Image (cartoon, helix red, strand yellow):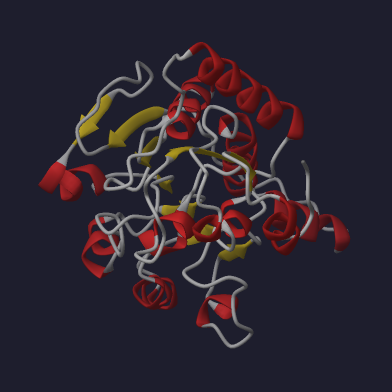
């Protein structure tokens, strides 16, 4: 049974034991569907299902290994725009002004990945394609071969040093909330750019706005925010060298999500472990 509105699921789906959908919609009905045994979400982030008032007596799986290519397109689209001075070249064209000043290159630059899961791993491989050096900060894992050096725990200060680009792909958990704060930003070189495609809660937005206004950070590319949509009076709208998008870095590509669900459904029928099961305590 397929429904468009959560209320329709409550009217006709109370006997369902499997649920497939967006976490924001699933959260509205989950507690009222007592027979649910498995939920497959269409997002990587499952924050709405981790609230304290939500039940946890079922298997929860999320969408992984499907967003890496789209996030890479987004991140490196902006990195190339920055290095190649695309906006200033376009402005020169509009002014009929010949602008042959030197531009930058990604080759040899240092990118730091705050989080090296499936998305971070894809970013690391793409960075190597452009000849970049790659540093990764994780809780403990070191499974991505495209990361040149790993950092953990209280090594965040060493991790931040000398970065040209910091890209955040961390999930939103209590452990990651506000991780990129004033101290973290101060450890970055003044020439560094911050790119956040993970969760808005990872970055202290007030501290970021202050750093950008002071010029102690070169700029920021932000696709996610603490509260969405971003309020019209939020200071980040007017901070210098800030590019804002609207949680659109990676939209769901239905064929990929469908394949993931079908594979997990077949595993369930065969009694095999499901892929990408979420640890409720860890938050991912």
Residue 117, x across and y down, in percent? 39, 32
Above or below, 51 relative to 214: above
In depth, the one of 88 and 167 nearer the eye is: 167
Position of residue 68 in the picture relative to residue 143 (left or right): right
In depth, the one of 49 and 31 nearer the eye is: 31
Residue 147, x across and y down, in percent? 33, 24
Residue 36, x across and y down, in percent? 52, 43
Q: Residue at x 26, y 69 (%)?
A: 182
Residue 245, x across and y down, in percent? 65, 60
Above or below, 81 relative to 244: above
Numbered marks: total? 0
Position of residue 177 in the picture relative to residue 42 (left or right): left
In depth, the one of 29 and 96 nearer the eye is: 29
Above or below, 188 relative to 167: below
For residue 88, which quarter of the picture? bottom right
Residue at far bottom of view = 233
Q: Residue at x 46, y 55 (%)?
A: 49
In depth, the one of 46 and 114 nearer the eye is: 46
Residue at far top of view = 270
Position of residue 195 in the picture relative to residue 229 (left or right): left
Q: Residue at x 53, y 27 (%)?
A: 65
Q: Quick one: quadrant of the C terminus?
A: top left
Q: Quick one: quadrant of the N terminus?
A: top right
């Amino acid at each position: 049974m397929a429904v468009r509105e959560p209320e329709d699921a409550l009217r006709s789906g109370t006997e369902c034991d499997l649920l497939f959908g967006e976490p924001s919609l699933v959260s509205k009905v989950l507690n009222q569907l007592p027979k649910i045994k498995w939920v497959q979400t269409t997002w990587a982030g499952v924050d709405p299902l981790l609230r304290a008032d939500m039940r946890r007596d079922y298997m929860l799986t999320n969408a992984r290994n499907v967003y890496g290519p789209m996030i890479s397109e987004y991140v490196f689209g902006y990195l190339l725009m920055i290095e190649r001075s695309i906006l200033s070249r376009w402005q020169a064209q509009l002014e009929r002004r010949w602008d042959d000043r030197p531009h930058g290159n990604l080759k040899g630059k240092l990118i730091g990945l705050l989080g090296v899961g499936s998305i971070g791993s894809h970013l690391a491989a793409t960075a190597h394609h452009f000849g970049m050096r790659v540093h990764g900060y994780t809780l403990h894992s070191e499974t991505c071969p495209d990361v040149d050096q790993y950092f953990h725990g209280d090594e965040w200060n060493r991790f931040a040093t000398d970065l040209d680009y910091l890209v955040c792909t961390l999930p939103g958990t209590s452990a990651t909330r506000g991780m990129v704060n004033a101290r973290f930003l101060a450890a970055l070189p003044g020439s560094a750019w911050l790119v956040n495609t993970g969760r808005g809660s990872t970055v202290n937005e007030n501290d970021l706005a202050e750093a950008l206004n002071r010029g102690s950070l070169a700029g920021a590319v932000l696709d996610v925010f603490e509260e969405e949509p971003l309020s019209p009076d939020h200071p980040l709208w007017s901070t210098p060298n800030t590019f804002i998008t609207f949680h659109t870095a990676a939209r769901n590509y239905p064929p990929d999500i469908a394949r993931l669900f079908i594979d997990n459904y077949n595993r369930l029928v065969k009694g095999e472990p499901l892929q990408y099961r979420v640890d409720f305590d860890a938050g991912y």
